[in-house]
Amino acid sequence: MKRAVFSFLFACFFFASVYAQQDPISGHTVIVFPFDNTSSSPSLEWLGECFPSALESHLDSPVLYVVTRDERLRAYDRQGVPSGVHPSRATLYRIAEQMDVDFAVFGSYSYDGARLTATAQLLDMRAQKLLPAAAESAPLFDLAIVQSTLAWDLLHSIHPNFTVSKDRYISSFPAMQLDALESYTHGVLAATAEEKIQNYREATRLNLSFPEAWLALGKAYFAERSYEQAGAAFEKIPPSSRLAREANFYLGLSAYAHGDFDKAERAFEFVAARVPLAEVYNNLGVVAARRGPGGQRRAAEDFEKAIENDPSNPDYHFNLGVTLARAGDKAKAGRELRLDLDARPTDSEAKNFLDSLALPGPAQTATASSAPAQAAPASPAKIPAERLTRTYQENAFRQMTTQMQGWAEQRFARSDPRSHARYHVELGNELLAHGFTTEAEAEFRHAATVDPASPAPLAALAEVYDARGDAAEARTQAEASLHLHESAAAYLVLARLDLRENRTASASDEIARALQLEPRNLTAQDLKRTLAAKLAEKAQPLPQP
């Protein structure tokens, strides 16, 4: 995947200039090291890993790529540092330098029996400068608030033009129970699959709205080949979550493993519509191939997309070769199988299958090239199964697109307008969720240009104007979106505006319409409760003097 990404570097620069009018996103890469426990309580040692986990989920955005724990542990391994050891600052600096990050975060925490105090400090790797430390304090049960407050402090240091207030930023994160965080972190640190599953299950029991814990639980089950349990965990992650793409990739694998090809296809299509990853197109091709003769053309198209995104992966050539042989095109199948063997000479399955096709040698091929091609399907008994890709590599894609949005633009420029626009709308939604309203607006406007018939960009623009306090323009954009097609998002913008203007009848109608479209929409349910409280307040008698 990475080699294929870098092979597009020059194209990236070209597309970045072509799309300069969009203000392509350029961001930073950050590594958060485990915090040091300076308290006298060994029982709080788990907090050291809890802080990087929380800061990753809070800071990670389209303009800021936060190195994952797995990537950090691989860097530790390259330096010969055991995962359970707290390295010196000098060693951490060498690790950050080796990973070529823009910023490194060092931190510590203490506990006096009543209050937890955490300190975080940014090291600017480019300027070789330590920035002023940020410190936050609160009762231990408010750990989640300490973490989100530190995230705001760090974000404001990295992006000084960040305009979202601290209170508003903190309130954007759901409440998190201390014991749920502790169970989740113990799961991260656990050495055995059984311990991981036990801790992740406890974390999700304590907090049903904990996407990180559901994803980790699903992956733990998946590693143990408990595919139905894995799929059930992955389905708990809402489509709006930043983890939904990875969850659906593994949901697709889990569904495929127990024969539910319809669910597998839907899950892989969810991911493919949002990020152009070779492994997702490959797996869509494998599912299509299982549909029988009718799916062969779709399978070949998907494998070709996978190869276009990552021509260096031999499995994709193998899969295309198998599908072409199944369709009777032995010559093209042989060419793909040879490309597989060029990259991986030890692939005995590919070699045996190529031999079974009994293709002519080079001299015979040259003589026969002028003759009409005859479609002679290979014997079904000799045709091997196409290969799934089980590794999800969005991080490699995101590391590139964080720095150079043009690469993603290049990938989507050849797709249908709806998928292209959806990508920019979801990118804008992630930016908006992290407070980058100007950048989000640029993405929504570009989406509206790419697909003028789509209501989603206009509904998203209404959200931007609502966040800015421009009620008139928010209403205009929401109504324009509804003119194209009904959506819960547009109705909810109008409902919020009407609630603020005490137009309760209109707000009630708009909330009802939103719930009719999306009965499980949490925002609509919250607004319904807000409306009920407002109506109850109006019905109360005036207080007696």
Image: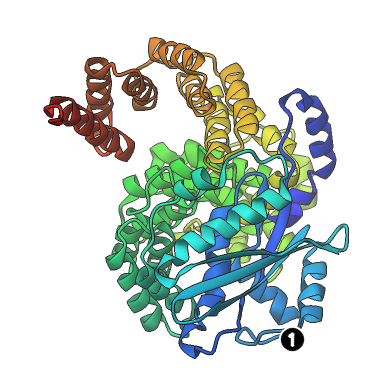
Q: Residue, x 22% and y 16% (percent of image)? A: 505
Percent x, y for residue 528? 24, 32
User: In the image, is 206 to the left or to the right of 307?
Assistant: left
Residue 226 drawn above or below residue 479: below
Mark 1 crowdedness (10 Å alpha carbons): few <14, some 14-19, many ≥20: few
**Residue in front for this viewpoint, 360 or 521:** 521
Percent x, y for residue 231? 33, 59
- Residue assigned mark 1: 80
**Residue in front for this viewpoint, 248 or 116:** 116
User: In the image, is 464 to the left or to the right of 3?
Assistant: left
Secondary structure beneath dot 1 equals loop
Residue 234 drawn above or below residue 544: below
Q: Farthest residue toward the right?
A: 127
- Which image quadrant: the N terminus? bottom right
**Residue in front for this viewpoint, 216 or 95:** 95
User: In the image, is 90 to the left or to the right of 201?
Assistant: right
Residue 510 lies in quadrant: top left
Percent x, y for residue 145? 47, 59
Residue 282 makes an appearance in the image = yes
Look at label 1 and name its amino acid.
Gly
Q: Residue, x 74% and y 29% (percent of image)? A: 23
Residue 230 lies in quadrant: bottom left
